[in-house]
Amino acid sequence: MNPKTLFTNFLIFFLVQISSLLVVNSLQAYHKKDYKSEFKTRPDTIVRIVISNDLFGLKNNENAGFVCTNGDKIWRKSKPGDRYVVVQFKYDGLRRHTFVHCHLRSNFGFVNFPVGIHPDTSAYCQPNNVCGYSIRKDGVFYMPEKKLYPWNRGGK
């Protein structure tokens, strides 16, 4: 082959590669979208996620305990009627969401459940910005979304 033809082919190949790279990079801006919410949350709004023990009227089965991945990771024992703030999140304009995993045990078994806070969560928690999880006989119930996390018997 002629060296001039090789050089021309290499130059064409190189220019095609660069142009395709530029096209791909320019399209990334169209496909990369930040999280958009239909709800607006004012700065300095504090949202609290509360867990309450609603195991009333059960003999020897009403105690429960839980631990979450945020903070000091202390195992908390709970009796019927107890309420605990699991997560308290302040919208400061820099962080717009947080996510925590919680583990709960009782004589019914155990439940692992996620706790996420973002602007849509705040909309569910209106008017006082408090959302609640309820410990029940059938599992842990997230009241705003009406979602049940059933007990896992774990080999019992």
Image (cartoon, rainbow, N blue to C red):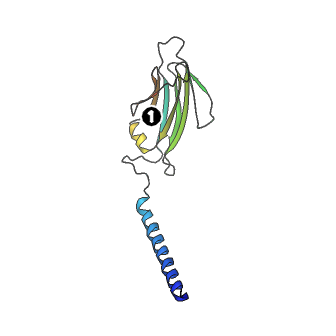
Question: Residue 142: x, y in percent?
Answer: 43, 31
Question: Residue 99: x, y in percent?
Answer: 52, 41
Total marks shown come to 1
Look at the picture and state if 3 lies above or below 68.
Answer: below
Look at the picture and state if 3 lies above or below 55.
Answer: below
Q: Which residue is mark 1?
A: 130
Question: Residue 8: x, y in percent?
Answer: 50, 85
Residue at screen point 43% across, 47% down: 42
In the rendered image, which quarter contains the C terminus? top right
Question: Residue 20: x, y in percent?
Answer: 45, 71
Q: Secondary structure at mark 1?
A: strand
Look at the picture and state if 7 lies above or below 36.
Answer: below
Q: Which residue is at the far top?
A: 59
Which of the pair 3/127 is nearer the observer? Answer: 3
Look at the picture and state if 95 lies above or below 137.
Answer: below
Q: Residues within 10 Å of mark 1 (few under 14, many from 20)?
A: some
Residue at screen point 39% across, 34% down: 145
Q: Which residue is at the far front?
A: 1
Residue at screen point 53% across, 33% down: 86
Which of the pair 13/133 is nearer the observer? Answer: 13
Which of the pair 2/49 is nearer the observer? Answer: 2
Which residue type carries mark 1?
Val
